[in-house]
Each structure stands twice: as structure tokens, then as C-alpha cells.
Amino acid sequence: MVDMGLAVKIAGGGFGVVFFLLTILWFTIWLTKVVAEKITKIINK
Amino acid sequence: MFGLLESGFQFFTWGNALMLIIGAVLIYLAIGKKMEPLLLLPIGFAIMLVNLPVGGLMDYEHEIKAKKSGIISQISVEEGNVFDKDATIVQADTGAIASPVFGRVKAIKVKKGQQVAAGDVVAVILTSQQTNQTEIPTKPIGLLAIFFSFGIMWQILPPLIFLCLGALTDFGPMLANPKTLLLGAAAQFGVYFAFFLSLLFGFSFNEAASIGIIGGAEGPTTIYVTAQLAPHIIGATAVACYSYMALVPLILPPVIKLLTTKKERGIYMKPTLRPVSKLEKILFPLVTTVIVILFVPASAPLIGCLMLGNLFRESGVVERLSNTAQTVFIDVMTIILTLAIGGTMVAENFLQVKTLLILVLGVISFASAAAAGVILAKIMNLFLKEKINPMIGGAGVSAVPMSARVVQVMGQQENKKNFLLMHAMGPNVAGAIGAAIAGGVFIGILG
């Protein structure tokens, strides 16, 4: 008999982690863009 | 006996014949229909090779040991003969000594009337069955078995292919429009939906995870996860994944059309994305590696290699490494990987009801992944000032770059001015990252 409670935890938790991480990456990409622009400005000075 | 005059005819079964036909069909699809020829051609040929009995290309050696001490009363299977799983090989007065796998007797190590102690080797057998090495340890003997054991079970080939894919991938479109990352994440719903369905059909947790990950539409990820969680079904999951990747032009359009109106499919998106600086492109693999691996350590081999390959590409200082990864190296890895995968598809392993179920669940996983991407794109449109064409959500299913191309073609059919390829590449590569993370999560929990 499959433990559906565990299945829900694995699926829900897993999907949540994927979503959370890719959202963090979205934020990171934005941060990377800002940092890259600052570095470029400093180098160009 | 294993002599020069031994032929394969006496061991040839209807199952072998059917597998030869399946191998030939894959080769036909590769040559005649140009469907994923780099993958299906060697897989098809390997299937034919391993279904020619006594060839031994996928043979593993396994020692059958006595569990209790006793006196041998009968040798039930002679040397050179084949037997089914759980067949009695040797009979002792304290009980039968059976083989936990199907195979062929290589050598009988005891004689009738001989006293054996618990743990003594009574026979050495050859099998093509993939086993859990902690329960049934086997030693690879055949060429393809060696490829499989040291290439896939040792987790070498899939991460190296990911390195090559990293060198081939331009993350620029995703960096230019990072909200498309969410579409790649949404598409991983298909993985978990198929995981649930597989459990309902009676598969174990590890098998269900391996079937679910087919929806990630990344061959190396599927192989990597299945090799660790359920190696006995690796042939079916790998073939399902690669076949459905080739069938994306048939699977994706009906799903998209079912979930969108003509007006939605015609939503215009500006053809140009913001320019992404070289520095951003260099920083992305570095930052992603740190963040993803800190959160999901089990994804380190896949994400680490993917990002290293991408750094080769974007750094601009290791052109030789980047070029090698994009050309010769990926070809060599692909040859070994596909031969090893095809090698697992011996009739006794492959011709099971389970295989058919895996193929059905695989396509459900694919379709639901695409559907989830499209639905999230529609939800995002409720909040976005500048609307996105919901079809690009379907490209979140990964299968880089096939699904993005399908979206581009569909976009052109609805609105001649629409060039969706670059927009669809965002969710497309995000889907590849998402699949690697989903695989890492499964391995982290179940591995």
C-alpha cells in the first residue's frame, strides 16, 4: 500500500523547492544585472 | 558449453525477435524520419546487439552462494543452459539454491554429494538483468555492461553530457527576460503529476520518481535519476524520454491549442530582447552554481557540470575547451551513453506490462508539463502590463531547442509578425535547470 501522505509531501515539497529556487534565481539574475552594470561603470571610469 | 561452435539459435526467443523489430523500428525512425537520429540510431542498434543470444555484450557475472550448509543432492541446471528468475540451480538436502535473476549458467562449482557450507559459491551465472548492487552484486563482463556500469551507474556520463549541453546553451534570452524562469518551474508540475499517477498504478516511490522525471524532457537528467533510483527500468525511461523529445512537434500543439484561444495565441511580443552584457553571462553560471547547490546538494553533479560548460562558453578564454565540449566530446559521450542504454533493453528486461505503462505515463508527464507552463503564462498575463504569448509557457517543458522551435512555428501560423523563438528559449532553458533541480530533489529524498 502506497503511503499517499509521504507522496504528497515529496511531490508538494519537491515542486515547492523547484519553484522557490527558480524564483530565487530570477532575483539573482536581477541582482547580477545591477552588479554587472555597477562594475562596468567603475571599469569605464 | 561455451565453445567456439556454440550458436545463438537454440536460445533465440520470440521476445528476442520482437526486440529486434523494435530496434529496427528505432533505426528506421532515425534514418527514414530523421527523428533524433544521434540517439535513436545507436540505441536501436544496441537493442539488436543485446538480443542476439550468447553475444554476451550485456552480460554480468553473479555468484550463486549457499545460504545454509548441506549436501548437494542434485544439479538442476547444467552449464550453458538458460533459466528464469528464481529458478533452482542446485538442490541441497537443506533446501533449493535458486538464482535471484534470470540468466545462463557459466560454471557449476559443486558436485553431487559434496558438502557445502553457508556462503560457499555453488555456481557462477551470467545475466543481463539490472540489479540493486547492494542486494545482488554483479560484475560487468560484456562491453555494453561495462559501459553501463562505469558510465551510468558510476554517474559519469550524464553529468559530462550536461557539461557539453552547458557549452551549447545560450542563457541570454532567459537573462534578458528572467520572469520566464517561472514558466520553466511551472512545467515541472508534469514531473510530480506523473509521479503521483505512477504510484497509483502500483510503482514504487523510486520507480515513480524515475517515471515522473521523464516530464523534465532532459535525457541525461532522466538517465541520471533512474540510474540512482530504479536502474531496472532505465531502458524504458530513457527511450520514453528521447522518443517524446523527438515527438514534441506532435505532443505540444494539441496541448497548447486546447488551453489557449486563437486571440491568445496571436499575442504579439516584441522581437528584440534587452542586450545582455558579457559580464552578466559570466556571473550567471557562477552565482547559479552556488545558490542551487547550497539549496539542493544532490543536484551538484548535473548543475555543476551544466554551469561549468556554460562558463567555458561565456568566458571566451577557453575556446578550445568550449569547442571540444560542443562537438567531439558530446559525440563521444553520446555514443557510449546511447549504446549503454540500448544495451539494457534485453527482451527479458524490456517486454513487460510495466514498460508499456512507463511509456503511457511518460507522455502524460510531457503533456501535463507543457499544460502547466501554458496555464501559468495565462495567469501571469492577468498581472502583466505587457502581455506574454501563453504559448511560450509550453516551451518550459525543456527538450531544448525543439519545443521553442515548435512555439515559433505555431506563433507564425497565428500572427505572421510574431517571432517567438527567443522568447520561448527563456522558459526552454529554465525548464532544463528546473528538471535538474527536480531530479536532485528526488535523489535527495529517495536516493
Image: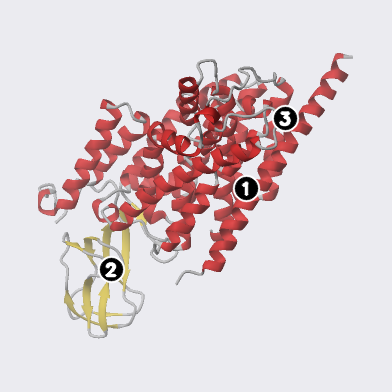
Amino acid type at circle 1 is: Val
Q: Are marks 1 and 3 in contact (CB under 8 Å)?
A: no
Mark 2 residue crowding within 10 angstroms, few (<14) / some (14–19) / many (20+)? many
The answer for how far apart the CA atoms under marks 1 and 3 are is: 21 Å
The answer for how far apart the CA atoms under marks 1 and 2 are is: 42 Å
Q: Position of residue B85 (x, y in %)?
A: 26, 66
Q: Which mark is residue B194?
A: none
Residue at (28% x, 40% y) in the render = B46
The residue nearer to you, when weighing B385 against B422, is B385
Q: Position of residue B56 (x, y in %)?
A: 25, 48
Amino acid type at circle 2 is: Ser
Residue at label 1?
A18
The answer for how far apart the CA atoms under marks 2 and 3 are is: 54 Å
Residue at (19% x, 41% y) in the render = B21
Task: Determine the chain carrying the residue at label 2.
Answer: B
Q: Position of residue B260 (x, y in %)?
A: 51, 35
Mark 1 residue crowding within 10 angstroms, few (<14) / some (14–19) / many (20+)? many
